Image (spheres, rainbow, N blue to C red):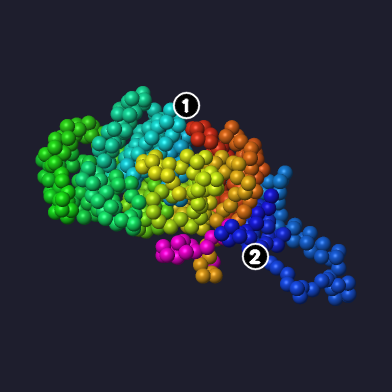
Amino acid sequence: MWGAVARHGKTVGAAAAASLVGAGAFSATSASLDDKSKVASCDAQSPTVLGLLQEIAQGVSRMEKTIGGLKNGVAASSYTPAVSNKNKNVNGIDVVLGAQWGDEGKGKLVDMLSQEYDVCARVAGGSNAGHTIVVDGVKYKFHLLPSGILNPKATCVIGNGVVIHLPSFLNELDALIEKGIPYEGRIKVSDRAHLVFDFHQEVDGKMEAKLGRHKIGTTKKGIGPAYASKIQRNGIRIGDLQNWKHFERRFRNLCDHHQRAFPGLEINVDEQLEYYKSISDRVNAMTIDTIQFTNEEYTKGKRILVEGANATMLDIDFGTYPYVTSSNPSIGSVLTGLGVSPTKISGIYGTVKAYCTRVGEGPFPTELDMVEGSVGYHLGHVGAEYGTTTGRGRRCGWLDIPQMKFSCTINGFTSINLTKLDVLTGLEEVKVGKAYHYKGEELKGMPADLEVLSDLEVEYEVMPGWTEDISNVKTFDELPVNAQNYVLRVQELLGVPIRWIGVGPNRLDVIDRGEGWDASNDE
């Protein structure tokens, strides 16, 4: 059951005691004996066999005290579940964020949690985000709407930090009607949210094509150009539709700006204005001051859940720039994209796959080959790793601990939602990328230099896999021992409790270890 430490799949050596990393917080160090190694003699100055055994026993005892020892072959956790804090503000704002490069399964957790919340909100990004949820065999795909819309009692807020392509947004609403999901009166759109226009999407595609082999790998949904309009202060906001003359003037000016900046860009201005005039009443009926609404709901004691889009490693500031999105899908966006103060934030839940994926370009330290029959192919095929928004196949790799520690540092996760553990079923061994090494030195933190990130070596920890089907497992103790040890080891390395564990694709295929595994409940 013990892990071995490897670098790029090659064992670098570990003493027997060091292999205890599979159960606790020890770093394995290389150990070897050369031809000149001395054999213990029996003279008075040499340690006796009995003495050596006593030292070993004392060492094991110290290890067990540190890591908790083993119980029925399962590594004990060093984290003590919190006692429910009765003084905790249960009406605070809880946040679900992506902790990797996106597509981690945030929507599924939000859908599950939202049944207990009064307000569900999106705060950043646009229709470049995508969440797929399966309910009673019916598949729902959301791009702009919070997944919490499936809770008939929840009000859904699209905050001021989101950029909205209205044709796509209205199509999502129409799809809800077709599937019998009522939404009237339950969707509130910020009057400060900026609009994405069709020409933003066309510009996005042109800019991507111009980059050639150096392309970013955007979804071509116009998100970057829309945020650019916002920053250049010539963008148009949802609230502008409430004053048609003002909207028309700003729209014509914005079209003129883009046609001058991008020669050959064709925009049928009058046709576009006719469309926006036709939908203005429908949009205006949902448009409010969401900052006032959200803070009033908080004051009333309502529970609020924020659904993050994209993920930390795609953050415009913290991600693998320039291979990132155009917003801040980390914890800071909750404050700026919803208009609430930091003191109102309670639980921060980081969503992470039991392995790692990435869509688009950019460095990916633990990436695996995707050829048929490989581990990478297994992850992509069994995990159905295709983008909700683009349909593109995702790149797959092992779980990256240095990257996750960086994400934990940025966001301050109070607990982890570990998804798709079931995808690892059937692998003979599973690995986690434990450390980064560059030019013989272990790196601390996440390098900003993409050349370093592309050329570094990953130190892997290897653990035995499992073959048992876990899709019907309901409690942590029902998981195979090796699966339990994998979860506990990840928890140990991250230093953050893992509360939720995904064991299948359906809505209820999740193990919830309880509120005690959420650090926001600590006294």
Q: Is residue 142 above or below residue 366?
A: above
Amino acid type assigned to the residue bearing label 2 in the image: Thr
- Percent of width and height locating residue 252: 12, 46
Above or below — where is 427 with respect to 117? below
Q: Residue at x 83, y 71 (%)?
A: 40
Nearer to us in this view, 282 or 303: 282
Q: Tell me whether the residue at label 2 lies in contact with that at label 1, contact meaning CB atoms closer than 8 angstroms.
A: no
Considering every residue shown, the one lying at the far front of the view is 372
Label ID, residue 22: none
Q: Secondary structure at mark 2?
A: loop
Q: Position of residue 165 (x, y in %)?
A: 26, 41
Circle 1 — which element? loop
Q: Which mark is residue 136?
A: 1
Q: What residue is at 33 percent from the left and 39 percent from the top? A: 144
Q: Position of residue 425 (x, y in %)?
A: 59, 41
Question: Hey, what amino acid is under mark 1?
Answer: Asp
Q: Residues within 10 Å of mark 2 (few under 14, many from 20)?
A: few
Quadrant of the rendered image containing residue 143: top left
| Label 2 vs 1, first from the N-terminus | 2
Q: Between 79 and 166, which is closer to the camera in this rendering? A: 166
Q: Which residues are magenta?
A: 442-460
Residue 29's disc is 2
Left/right of residue 164 with respect to residue 433 in the rendered view: left
